Amino acid sequence: MPGFLGVIEDERHAVKIAEEIGYPVMIKASAGGGGKGMRIVKRKQEVAEGFARARSEAKSSFGDERVFIEKFIVDPRHIEIQVLGDKHGSVVHLGERECSIQRRNQKVIEESPSPLIDAETRRRMGAQAVALAKAVGYDSAGTVEFVAGQDKSFFFLEMNTRLQVEHPVTELVTGIDLVEQMIRVAAGEPLAIKQQDVKLAGWAVESRIYAEDPFRSFLPSTGRLVRYRPPEEGTSRGATVRNDTGVYEGGEISIWYDPMIAKLVTLAASREQAIDAQANALDQFAIDGIRHNIPFLAAVMQNERFRAGKLSTAFIAEEFPDGFRGREPDAGIGELMAAVAAAVDLVVGERRRGISAQLPSRPVRRDSRRVVKLGETEQRLEVAREGDTIKVRMFEAESREKSTHLLHSAWKPGGLVWTGTVDEHPVAVQVRAVLNGFDLAHRGVRVRALVYTEREAAAARLMPVKVSADTGKKLRCPMPGLVISIGVKEGQQVRAGETLAVVEAMKMENVLRAEQDATVSRVLAKPGDSLAVDAVILEFA
């Protein structure tokens, strides 16, 4: 691919190189990885800042500020080939991984095989990857990365001489333990695997669980993992769930390390089944204490374009151009979540009456009619227990019954995830108790479900709506982080888009820009300050 791999002396040199290559270009850390030290530059005016930010991140993350520049391919796909070599000259490839779902050049969702690649393209890419590894005498596991066009053309990008974060999808579809093979190779053993032995069976999908807030432009989130309950691992209903992690409940997520919490991987016979299994596993993944990207990942699993395999590295920017706002509940999911909210409320009520020592022979009569408010939508229903089943009858506004749902679950009050069946279909819903109801999450939909009696609902409609205070004249730190630089002075007039400050968190530098024209009245932070989330950096007149 067109690019410049020599030493880039300064910003002017970077501009000269970029113009020779032709915009857009990618400025990348020579010692980089994980999306650190990478900037896409679309025009001359962005080169200086992109060059400075890439060098600074590279030095902070890798202790090496060298960068190179290469052509950025528009609408590309990121395809990589896993290779494995020994110290005796043998090298094989283990098929491809698709890693096109990226944000800020950092992979978010990976899968193997790729929905783009056919058998012939896989053979050609694999042959080139093996030839490269042999040419440099490489042994151990490694990854040869390619930028691929939608027409299946591909260009060599780089080789990562290490184990990749996404290696589990390859392990699951090939049945080969890469870490075991690395240890055997390091001990001098010859590879026992021949190329003809490598078969891809099934489809694997991996989601990276990050400590970041998708509702606030994916800004890093720090704090203590008050609750960390991943889904159960193993094989069930034809799907395998695997969770690779290094954190634990009660541990702290700090600003000093990469924000990854876990890698959730599912394997099934087909891509559609693997995606559905991933969606189910994400619904069962409970994390409290910090913000995380599970709602976003769950929403992607329901995205029509993703499910169709029409991917590119611009997927997130194109599908969520205004940022992630969560999925709106359609009629089906809204009805399901209302039914679960009513069932959970019934179980909680039964528990409370048991604690207050109500005798079974003298049950308290309780009206079974409820109004469940999901956001601004109200659902009238009736909920009652019939043995191990909870029956929920839904009503139209005119009191006509529109549907009935039968729910089974072993959920108990305090449980973080309601798991069970709704009309015999397996369902998992995140549950957090709030005043008069519950915060629920399912398939990327997050909603507050308030459960009222009909009289309570009538009173709630009369309550005034709380209005948030205006904080538009302050620049607040969007995440806990270290101030790298302040780009303005008191009294300075700034225009929309100008850089106000740069804050580093989790080895990534975040440029804070002016959203509109304004005048800076006070600067309250300085380079080197460690700020908490929402700390005021500066104020506008």
Image (cartoon, helix red, strand yellow):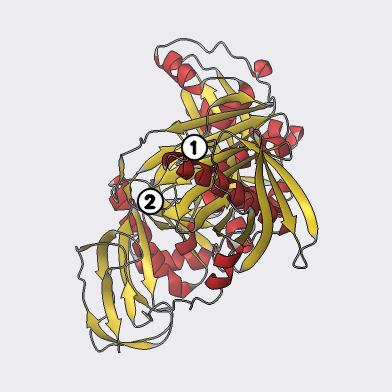
> Residue 257, can we see it?
yes
Horizontal arrangement in the rendering, residue 215 relative to residue 7 (left or right): right
Q: What is the secondary structure assignment of the residue under circle 2?
A: loop
Horizontal arrangement in the rendering, residue 261 relative to residue 431 (left or right): left
Q: Nearer the viewer, residue 348 or 309?
A: 348
Q: Nearer the viewer, residue 363 or 480?
A: 363
Q: Nearer the viewer, residue 42 or 464?
A: 464
Q: What label sits on residue 290 in the rendered view?
A: 2
Q: Quadrant of residue 120?
A: top right
How many marks overall?
2
Q: What label sits on residue 403 in the rendered view?
A: none
Up/down of 258 relative to 103, above or below: above
Label 1 crowding class (10 Å Cα cut-off): few <14, some 14-19, many 20+?
few
Whole-percent x and y of residue 392? 69, 48
Residue at screen point 62% across, 56% down: 315
Up/down of 393 relative to 139, above or below: below
Amino acid type for the residue under numbered disc 1: Leu
The residue to which callout 1 is attached is 359
Residue at screen point 65% across, 20% down: 198
Q: Quadrant of residue 503?
A: bottom left
Mark 2 vs mark 1: in front: 1
Q: Nearer the viewer, residue 306 or 446?
A: 446
Whole-percent x and y of residue 262? 45, 38
Q: What is the secondary structure assignment of the residue under circle 1?
A: loop
Q: CA distance from mark 2 to mark 1?
A: 42 Å
